C-alpha cells in the first residue's frame, strides 16, 4: 500500500513543491555558515519574507517584484545580524535567536497594523505552474518535475549557480577561505568583514525568498505560524549536506519526500497511529544531526568572530 504512494506522479510533484522552501532556506543558511557565521535568525527571516512578499503582492498585484521585496527585507535582516556578529563580535547564537523573535513578532504586528479588521487572511493570485515544453510530456517524471512554479525553477537555478560559484570562481575561493581561515584571507587582501557581511545578507535574502514561496506560490495567503519550524529544519539540512550545495539539493529532496509521504499516509487507517508519520521528518532531522554532525567537515571559523591582529 505504501509503495503505491511512492510511484505516483502527484506524490513527487508535491515533494518538489515542499522542497522549494527548504532548498532556498538551506542554501541561504549554507552561504552564511560557509563564511563562518551561524544564522539562527532563519526562522524569523523566513517569516518576515513570507509576510513582506505577500503584503507587497496583495497591494500591488506584481508577484516578481514581491519576490524582490522579500529578498531586500531578508538582506536588511542579514545586515542586522552581520553588524551584531561580524563587526561587534557578539554571540551568533544569541543574535540569531533574538532576530528570530524580533522578526516573527514584527511580522505579525505589521500584518495586524496594515489589516486591522481582517479576520480571515485575504488571498492573492499566486504563481501559476509553468510547463517545460517536451519535458513536461514525459510520463510521471514530466508531471512531477517539469510542471512547477517559476520559483521552483528559480531555486534549482540558484543551486546550480552556487555549485559553480563556490567551486569554480575566485569569489567562491574567497568565501571558502574566509570560512576556513579568515586571518589567511586577510593577509591575501580579502576584506573579511565585507565578504562575511555580503554573504550573510545574500544568504538571509534567500531565506526570505524561501518564506515568500509559501505565500506567493505554495499557498495564496499569509497565516500566523505558517513557517512552523521550517527554518530550524534548514539548519539541520546544512549539516546533513556537509556544507555542500549539491548534497544539500538531494538532502532537501529526501526530506521533502518524507514530509509529502507523511501527509498522504496519515489518511490511511490501520497500522501505526498517524501521529507517528507526522513525527517522521523531525525524527530524520534528529538522526541526521546525531550521526553526521560529529564527523562533519564544518568550516573551521564557524562561530568564531574574527578580530584583525588577534591570534
Image (spheres, helix red, strand yellow):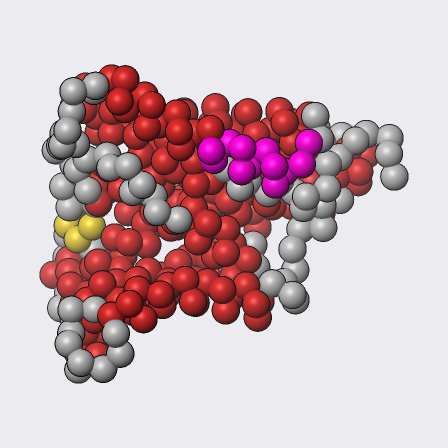
Identify the residue at image location x=24%, y=17%: 114
Q: In which quarter of the image is residue 43?
A: top left
**105 or 174, nearer to the observer:** 105
* Residue 80 visible: yes
Is 282 located above or below residue 197 in the figure?
Answer: below
Is 89 left, or right, of 118 in this rendering? Answer: right
Residue under the image location 81 percent in, 29 percent down: 308
Q: Let me know if residue 78 is in the magenta part.
A: no
Quadrant housing residue 298:
bottom right
Camera-side residue of 311 and 89? 89
User: What is the magenta range?
Assistant: 90-101
Query: Where is residue 6 shown, x and y percent of the image?
Result: 22, 74
Q: Position of residue 240 (x, y in %)?
A: 52, 61
Picture quarter with the N terminus: bottom left
Q: Is residue 212 visible?
A: no
Q: How many labels does the image show?
A: 0
Looking at the image, residue 1 lies above or below residue 62: below
Amino acid at each position: 500500500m505504501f509503495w503505491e504512494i511512492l510511484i505516483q506522479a502527484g506524490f513527487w510533484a508535491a515533494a518538489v513543491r515542499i522542497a522549494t522552501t527548504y532548498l532556498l532556506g538551506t542554501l541561504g543558511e549554507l552561504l552564511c555558515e560557509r563564511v563562518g557565521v551561524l544564522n539562527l535568525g532563519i526562522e524569523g527571516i523566513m517569516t518576515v519574507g513570507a509576510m513582506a512578499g505577500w503584503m507587497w503582492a496583495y497591494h500591488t498585484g506584481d508577484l516578481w517584484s514581491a519576490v524582490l521585496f522579500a529578498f531586500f527585507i531578508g538582506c536588511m535582516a542579514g545586515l542586522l545580524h552581520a553588524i551584531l556578529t561580524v563587526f561587534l563580535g557578539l554571540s551568533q547564537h544569541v543574535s540569531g535567536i533574538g532576530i528570530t523573535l524580533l522578526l516573527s513578532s514584527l511580522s505579525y504586528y505589521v500584518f495586524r497594523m496594515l489589516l486591522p479588521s481582517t479576520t480571515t487572511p485575504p488571498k492573492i493570485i499566486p504563481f501559476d505552474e509553468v510547463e517545460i515544453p517536451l519535458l513536461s510530456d514525459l510520463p510521471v517524471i514530466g508531471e512531477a518535475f517539469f510542471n512547477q512554479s517559476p520559483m521552483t525553477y528559480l531555486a534549482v537555478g540558484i543551486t546550480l549557480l552556487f555549485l559553480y560559484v563556490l567551486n569554480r570562481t575566485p569569489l567562491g575561493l574567497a568565501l571558502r577561505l574566509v570560512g576556513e581561515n579568515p586571518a589567511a584571507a586577510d593577509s591575501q587582501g580579502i576584506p573579511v568583514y565585507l565578504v562575511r557581511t555580503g554573504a550573510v545578507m545574500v544568504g538571509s535574502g534567500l531565506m526570505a525568498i524561501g518564506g515568500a514561496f509559501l505565500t506567493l506560490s505554495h499557498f495564496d495567503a499569509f497565516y500566523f505560524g505558517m513557517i512552523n519550524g521550517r527554518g530550524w529544519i534548514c539548519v539541520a539540512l546544512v549539516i546533513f549536506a556537509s556544507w555542500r550545495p549539491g548534497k544539500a539539493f538531494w538532502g532537501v529532496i529526501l526530506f521533502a519526500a518524507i514530509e509529502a509521504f507523511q501527509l498522504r499516509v496519515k489518511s490511511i487507517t490501520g497500522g501505526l497511529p498517524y501521529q507517528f508519520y507526522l513525527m517522521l521528518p523531525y525524527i530524520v532531522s534528529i538522526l541526521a544531526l546525531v550521526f553526521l554532525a560529529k564527523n562533519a567537515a564544518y568550516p573551521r571559523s564557524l562561530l568564531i568572530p574574527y578580530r584583525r591582529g588577534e591570534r
